[in-house]
Image: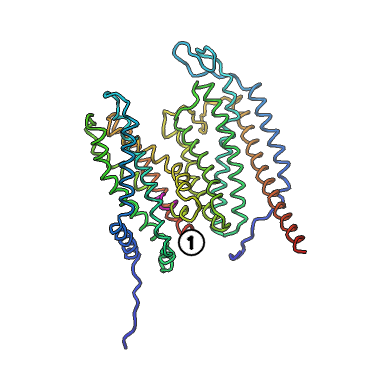
Amino acid sequence: MARASIKKPSTFAQYRTLLAKDLRREFRTKEMLTAMGIYALLVLVVYGAALSQTSNQFDILQMAAGLLWALVVFTSLLGLNRSFAHEQENACLEGILLVPLDRSVVFLAKATSNLIFLVVVEIVVLPLFYFFFLTTTQPADTWPLIWLPLLVGTVGIAGIGTLLATITVNSRGKDVLLAVLFIPLVFPLLYACVAASTVVLAGGDVEGVFGNSLLLAGGYDVVMVLLSWVLYDYVISA
Amino acid sequence: MGKDGYRSPQTGGVLDRIAPVVTLIGALLSTAGFVLAFTLAGPVNGATVNGVEVIGGEMVSNQLLFSQKIFYFHMPVAVTSMVMIGFVAYFGIRFLQTRDAAWDERARIAAGIALLFVLATMFTGEMWERFEWGVWWTWEPRLTTYFILMLLVFAYFVMRASFDEPERRATFASVYGIVMFIDVPITFAITRIVPSSVHPTIFRTDSGLSPDMLLPLLLSLFGMLCIAYGLFRLRLRAQELDERVEHIKEQLDEA
């Protein structure tokens, strides 16, 4: 006698499916990526105006990492706001929650997709930033290491941002609320990442500052992502 | 509610009965600390400056700092604010465990009192900066992290205001209260992590504080903690009485 069997998909399969859904949706509509990309370009244009009255000898290298991180934070705010907006249409989120899966899988999938979009935007923006502001300068030899703080910082931003975006998507005035909640919370991470990025770009005590800052940023990432992961169940079920 | 042996936290018990007395003791202790800071604790040398500089409208080379007395108020208030934020996180965890609105109410009140102490810390810190360091603002590590702590407490209340449903608001506020607490150990430890910090490391076995300085400091500290406790219980009690009055009003309207 043939027995009907229903195989429960593994947690990893659920994660992959959710992630693939987000990626497929984004690469079809390109809604978030175009918005974030254009916004980032516009921030660069604003920087151009802001720095236009400075002299040629202006020490842009010391400021470059800070400007870059300001760009990353504001661009990620824009993207995070959008990441749950389309889940609300047609009650998509309720649909996902009807599936008997661990809620933290939803968090991990969403955080990963946000991370991927942010990284894509950063890959586009970084050369543009160099093109507009740094071609006349001589970055330190260690500059390729900048990918490390960028990655560590972006992981933290995606992790905390996903938790907070889930909270704010239900609120009144969600764009403002996300910024109010998000910026103070990522500040320590931002501080450490700016320190690490500046030292590889402009040179200096690379071993001391770079390692310590990166360690701090990494520790903050671990704590924040774990905490978001644990608390996500409560947030998404509320 | 649901779980075996779980009792919703009550007001009106012994914790409330001692609250007025504890507040009074706190007021007396912190006043004693304040007075002793001027009478018992000796003056402290300011940071040495190169040659002579104008700080706070005075020519200074190495004056005995009168402004250092702020310390006996500043540090106890700061520690109390951090303790209260710790309680916000604790009540948040309790709420998520039990889904009992009483815990959320406690978290909100604790956050309110934390805000009061945070503002007091920022205010005294600002006076300190102006007269001790000679600047209005600097992005010094502990100053920055504490400033962020203040913004987090602001954000906590902004967030509460943007949700209407009590259950949802309570859940989100609890989660944010817990996440917000991460900045407290960072602020606390930043003077150890970043040694360039201007703030001294006070909590250590050889804190460099002589007994005549330690006594007023500890008196103020315990006084402030007592005041925070008293304010918390009294505010909580007032809140419950408020709700009871509202309830009675509704019943009278119906009758």
At horizontal 60% and vertical 20% (from top left) the residue drawn is B42
The magenta stretch is A158-164
Q: Quadrant of residue A11?
A: bottom left
At horizontal 39% and vertical 50% (from top left) the residue drawn is A80
Q: Position of residue A206 (x, y in %)?
A: 29, 32
Q: How many marks?
A: 1
User: As displayed, is residue B19 above or below residue A162?
Assistant: above
The image's colour scheme reads rainbow
Extreme residue toward the bottom, this view? A1
Tell which of A61 and B18 is nearer to you.
Answer: A61
At horizontal 75% and vertical 58% (from top left) the residue drawn is B248
Q: Position of residue A107 (x, y in %)?
A: 40, 57
Tell which of A76 and B14 is nearer to you.
Answer: A76
Q: Position of residue A163 (x, y in %)?
A: 43, 53
Question: Disc 1 residue type?
Answer: Ser
Q: Quadrant of residue B95?
A: bottom right
Tag 1 residue: A237
User: As displayed, is residue B61 above or below residue B73?
Assistant: above
Q: Is residue B94 visible?
A: no
Q: Chain of mark 1?
A: A
| Left or right of B73 on screen, residue A177 | left
Q: Secondary structure at mark 1?
A: helix
User: As displayed, is residue A170 above or below residue B198?
Assistant: below
